[in-house]
């Protein structure tokens, strides 16, 4: 039943709900009305039995129970009976036999109990009998229980209920069709966008309330998809442009080696020094392509990551990144001045960002000048600064430092793809922070990252309170 219901359209569901609600309402109304009608009919019948009993009792008191003239049986409706002192009974001629006098009615005739209203079942019909004491006996007036009014009322209510259910289904269907018309148009527009792949076709805003909010949400989604497609297209174009130069150089060098090898002049045409330099260039170009591919993959993933967010000490991340740089570039000196600051973030992503900052500074820092890395708490932020003693960044290049593939004219000859700082900005933004560039006191570039500091749980706060975690 659940599977069938879930497969139905919203129109069908609304129609079924409307028809069911009306059917339940009619059934409840029928039950209540039937009970009220039955109670009213019984009350009227009992009052009539009491009135007829008093009339018969008055006649019996005057003439005596044995001599009182009983009214003739009218053929239907009221029945009478007299209970004599000896327990025998008198009934009008031709009247159907009433059920046997009950024990309680006998006690009324004997004066041991008050008047009595009771229901009895006969051979064919049911009776309602009222017993009233008179002299040394009693009189009884009864009538056959008649369910025909209730049955006629029930039949009428059934017909009315069926009409109401059918009318409710029609009304529900009409209301559903009218109310869901904007949804139909919205669905058609969404299908058209899906078929044509035209993300620039916004869905017209119509209606109000929930429909309007849904249309706005879908338009916002289309806008996000447009931005994503535009970003993908730019990334592909920029990647193709950046890959063209190293691939061309790599292809030319390989073609040179293949041509010389086919001629058999590889050993004579190139000296050992030239071959060594050529092979080193090939290795450097392959390494550059590998690094570029890795950075492109990382950048294309955006903020999608399986790494979970955790509470961590940013000092550990900075120290790990500095250690990794020292292992890769032994000649680069990295001076750390860091203080324990806790943040909520993804360790690997943050370490990659710090590593890119130090790598970028290492390209510009003179051999005799270290790259300085400082980490401190400043208000509610963790502030990371990386500066070098290089030539600094020109004012014209500052606005585009964090753009993908952007490289200043002075950096064209240096290794790199122009993606490192773009990855830094993406990671920092994903953690709710911001990245900025300025000129350092040593004349070089100062790259600053501000991240929201995390509130420490009480046990960790007590452990870190008063500790000097500065690392030199």
Image (tube, helix red, strand yellow):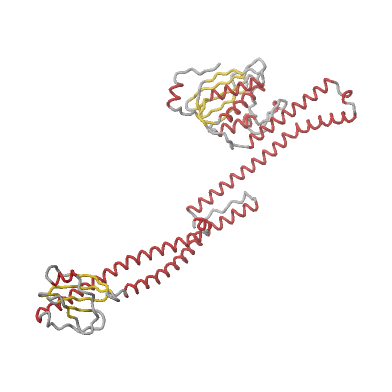
The percent coordinates of residue 305 (x first, y second) are 58, 36
Residue 136 quadrant: bottom left
Which residue sits at x=80%, y=25%?
A: 278
Classify 220 as above or below 55.
above
Which residue sits at x=77%, y=24%?
A: 280
Which residue sits at x=64%, y=42%?
A: 230
The percent coordinates of residue 314 (x first, y second) are 53, 25
Q: State left or right for residue 228 relative to residue 116.
A: right
Q: Which of 265 and 445 is in front in this view?
A: 265
Indicate the quadrant containing the C terminus: top left, top right, bottom left or bottom right: top right
Which residue sits at x=44%, y=62%?
A: 18
Q: Which of 213 and 343 is in front in this view?
A: 343
The percent coordinates of residue 48 (x first, y second) are 21, 75
Classify 469 as above or below 246.
above
Q: State left or right for residue 195 relative to residue 113.
A: right
The percent coordinates of residue 445 (x first, y second) are 62, 23
Residue 265 quadrant: top right
Number of numbered discs visible in the structure rendering:
0
Q: Which residue lies furthest to the top in this view?
A: 368
Q: Which of 239 and 342 is in front in this view?
A: 342
Classify 256 as above or below 2.
above
């Amino acid at each position: 039943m659940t599977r069938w219901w879930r497969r139905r359209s919203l129109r069908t569901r609304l129609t079924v709900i409307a028809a069911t609600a009306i059917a339940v309402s009619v059934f409840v109304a029928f039950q209540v009305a039937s009970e009220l009608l039955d109670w009213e009919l019984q009350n009227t019948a009992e009052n009539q039995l009491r009135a007829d009993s008093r009339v018969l009792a008055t006649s019996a008191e005057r003439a005596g129970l044995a001599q009182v003239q009983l009214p003739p049986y009218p053929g239907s409706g009221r029945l009478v009976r007299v209970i004599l002192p000896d327990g025998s009974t008198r009934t009008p001629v031709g009247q159907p036999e009433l059920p046997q006098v009950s024990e309680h009615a006998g006690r009324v005739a004997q004066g041991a109990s008050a008047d009595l209203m009771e229901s009895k079942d006969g051979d064919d019909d049911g009776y309602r009998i009222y017993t009233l004491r008179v002299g040394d006996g009693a009189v009884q007036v009864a009538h056959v229980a008649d369910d025909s009014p209730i049955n006629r009322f029930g039949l009428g209510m059934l017909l009315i209920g069926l009409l109401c259910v059918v009318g409710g289904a029609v009304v529900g269907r009409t209301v559903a069709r009218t109310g869901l018309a904007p949804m139909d148009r919205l669905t058609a527009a969404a299908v058209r966008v899906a078929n044509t792949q035209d993300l620039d076709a916004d869905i017209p805003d119509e209606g109000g309330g929930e429909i309007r909010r849904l249309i706005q949400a879908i338009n916002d989604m289309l806008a996000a998809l447009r931005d994503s497609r535009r970003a993908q297209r730019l990334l592909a174009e920029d990647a193709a442009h950046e890959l063209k130069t190293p691939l061309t150089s790599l292809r030319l060098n390989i073609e040179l080696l293949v041509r010389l090898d086919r001629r058999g002049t590889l050993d004579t045409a190139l000296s050992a020094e030239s071959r060594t330099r050529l092979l080193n260039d090939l290795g450097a170009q392959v390494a550059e392509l590998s690094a570029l591919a890795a950075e492109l993959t990382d950048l294309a993933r955006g903020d999608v990551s399986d790494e979970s967010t955790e509470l961590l000490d940013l000092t550990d991340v900075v120290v790990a990144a500095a250690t990794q740089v020292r292992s890769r570039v032994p000649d680069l000196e990295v001076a750390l001045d860091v203080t324990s600051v806790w943040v909520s973030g993804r360790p690997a992503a943050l370490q990659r960002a710090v590593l890119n900052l130090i790598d970028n500074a290492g390209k510009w820092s003179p051999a005799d000048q270290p790259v300085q890395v400082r980490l401190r708490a400043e208000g509610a932020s963790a502030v990371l600064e990386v500066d070098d003693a290089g030539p600094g960044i020109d004012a014209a290049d500052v606005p585009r430092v964090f753009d993908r593939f952007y490289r200043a004219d002075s950096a064209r000859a240096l290794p790199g793809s122009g993606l490192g700082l773009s990855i830094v900005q993406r990671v920092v933004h994903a953690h709710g922070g911001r990245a900025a560039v300025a000129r350092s006191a040593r004349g070089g570039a100062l790259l600053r990252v501000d991240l929201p500091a995390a509130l420490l749980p009480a046990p960790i706060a007590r452990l870190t309170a008063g500790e000097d975690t500065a690392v030199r």
